[in-house]
Amino acid sequence: MTWTLPNVLTVLRLLAVPFLGAVFVVAGNTSAGRWTALALFVAASLTDIADGWIARRRNQCTEFGALIDPIADKALMATALICLSADDLLSWWATALILAREAGVTALRLAVLHRGVIPASRGGKVKTVAQTTMIVLALAAPGWTGVLAAVVTVTVCWTVVTGLDYGVKALALTRSRASSLPPSAGPRWLLRR
């Protein structure tokens, strides 16, 4: 691993995940626990913005960062969602749909990796912002149920829509790569699957 500043920030975000979970377990049902969890979550989320910006600006994009960054993001989000639902601050149906979408998109990306990479879309970035906003709102104003319910509904709908978009992109990538194979390579390619 190359110890660049972006990679250090990504590792710090990953290391924040068990602390976030511990805060929820120990004091998640108290006001002090929620505010501590909120501070940890926001700080970790800011490292996600910072590491990508610094990596691009300083030309410090690495394979390690490309591998660990999405793992850290998903671990942070999944931990927050599961803990919020366990503390009855967020509906389990929302957590289940969001986590199912994330697992599905990850599996899809891995399945088509030998054909090409599906890059993060703008919709996916908006989805991350929406999920982060939802988590911050659930922690900061847990009793604000009307607004929170609306934010949860919009966030889950957008999460599902962007997941379907990745499915369409994966199908298009599969079809375009398959049609670009020379005729003689077709049967051998099928056998390799």
Image (tube, helix red, strand yellow):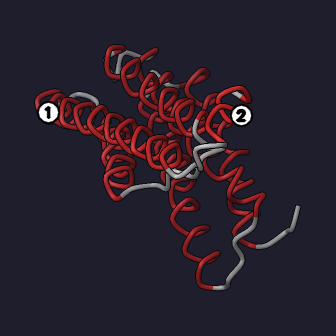
| Rendered residue at 69%/69% (across/down) | 6
Question: Which element carries disc 2, helix, strand or loop?
Answer: helix
| Of the pair 51 and 176, the residue shown nearer to us | 176
Q: CA distance from mark 1 to mark 2?
A: 52 Å
**Element type at mark 1:** helix
Q: Is residue 138 left or right of residue 77?
A: left
Q: Which mark is residue 46?
A: none
Q: Position of residue 108 (x, y in %)?
A: 52, 33
| Identity, as a three-letter code, of the amino acid under mark 1 | Ala
The residue at 69%/46% (across/down) is 14
- Residue 150 numbered mark, or none: 1
Tally the numbered discs. 2
Residue 168 drawn at (x, y percent): 34, 39
Of residue 18 and residue 143, the one placed in the foreground of this image is 18
Query: Where does label 2 land, which residue?
Result: 188
Disc on the earlier residue, 1 or 2: 1
Image quarter in which the N terminus is found:
bottom right
Q: Position of residue 7 (x, y in %)?
A: 74, 64
Kindly give the residue lying farthest to the front in the view shown. 184
Q: Position of residue 145 (x, y in %)?
A: 17, 27
Identify which residue is drawn at 50% across, 23% down.
83
26 versus 56 height, above or below? above
The image quadrant where one finds the C terminus is top right
Choose top left, top right, bottom left or bottom right for residue 89.
Answer: top left
Of residues 174 and 3, which is closer to you in this image?
A: 174
Out of 177 and 157, give the one closest to the viewer: 177
Tell me the crowding category of disc 2: few under 14, some 14 to 19, or many 20 or more residues within 10 angstroms, Cα based: few
